[in-house]
Amino acid sequence: MLRYHLLSCSVVIGVAACTAPDIETGLVAFGEGLTAVEKPLSPMLDQRIAEEERRTRETAISELALVYAAPTSCETLVFGPAEAGSFLDKAASACVLEPRVTAPVTRGSAKYAADGLAALSQYLAVVQDIAKSDVSPETSANFSGFLGSLNSFAAVANAGGGPVISDARIAPLSSLIGRAVEARRAQIMRRLVNAAHPEIKKIIAELIAYVDQSSQITAQAQALGDAYERMTTAQDNGSVQQYRAAVRAYEAEFASYQTTFNKSDTARLMALWKAHQLLHAQVNGPGDPEALIALLEDLKALSDA
Amino acid sequence: MSKDIRKLKTYEDLYNLGWAAIGKLDDRANEETDVNKRNALRAKRSEIRAFMYELRNAQLVELTTPTTTKSAGDQLRDAVKKAKKEMRKLENLATALKAATDLLNMAQRLVKLVL
């Protein structure tokens, strides 16, 4: 089981009162949120990236630009065997189609969206690594071993001089070092999550804008609001028959929008953002249990959709 | 309202202001029994809501338009890189202590041989 506990220490380490806010739920929610986003979005982005590359290549062809590098690696494969490290020593995996023109990573492109998504994955991996790191107990144990060895060395080198440090003090000192390292680990984690927070917001905002181009969720939300306005207008017009019809139309529009939205990338990206808000809150304080319960319910609903 | 808008810097500020106003107009319209007044309140609500979508659509275009500024993904990678570096430093501390212990143990064996 990973240790997702973060020490929160203040003032001087030696006398600090340390509490351990649990960030496991925040990390798990963010991980689940990211998986929910990636699962449907990644294949779609791969497909679009391939299309962007194809278009870039077509443009280059029309300009008579060289679109592929020479297949030297593939040709030399049949000239073996050769000594390791020599020019001819190639693995079959070296034989790949090498494009000389590639689509640029510009905002609004699938490549840019995929890059943002990849950055989120890299971020999650590092936050998890830091959270599960056992550097503090390891440092504590190594320090204890070091002091023990120091005493043994002193005993051998300086017979009769006594230990450098009394055995009774080794354990408390090692524990203190462990706590200092733990506090530093907590600080690194907190700094990373805090520095990442605004960037994650931007990445998610850009991803939502990117997927909206095809899903048109914003236009659908507007249509829902329009249906509501038609209903209130019918109410004000005073015709029960028209009003009843408008109410039915609004109900249908609402059901349709809700189904579409819950299955959308936008919903999953918003859940991911909520998860990071939770992680951010947990790293900086105790977090909000009600927000957590609501978020976990959302994530469950989105993964069932 | 336009005077307020000039002071606001982000889309988020404008959305917060606009949707709060829509909520208030909704509440007032729902309490209003005079149909003409209710109509007027709803017309104002509708106007602000249309403006919200104009803003959102403008923001969506902005968020998908190429830019020369460093991408948020790269900024995030920078933060990750820095944290990894700091964490490695911390891990090196544990390794250094282990190395020092090994060195001491070796020195101890040497001393035993010499003495």
Image: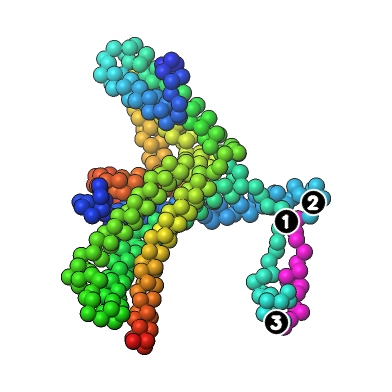
**Residues in magenta, as a range:** A67-81
Three-letter amino acid code at the position of disc 1: Arg
Disc 3: which residue: A83
Q: Chain of mark 3?
A: A
- Lower position in the chain sequence, tag 3 or tag 2: 2
Residue at image x 31%, y 49%? A283
In the rendered image, residue A98, in percent from the top left (x then y), is placed at 70, 61
Residue at image x 35%, y 16%? B41
Magenta segment: does it hold A1? no
Disc 2: which residue: A65
Magenta segment: does it hold A71? yes
Disc 1: which residue: A100
Q: CA distance from mark 3 to mark 2?
A: 36 Å
Q: Quarter of the image holding residue B15?
A: top left
> Mark 2 and 1 residues: CB-CB less than 8 Å, in contact?
yes
Q: CA distance from mark 2 to mark 1?
A: 9 Å
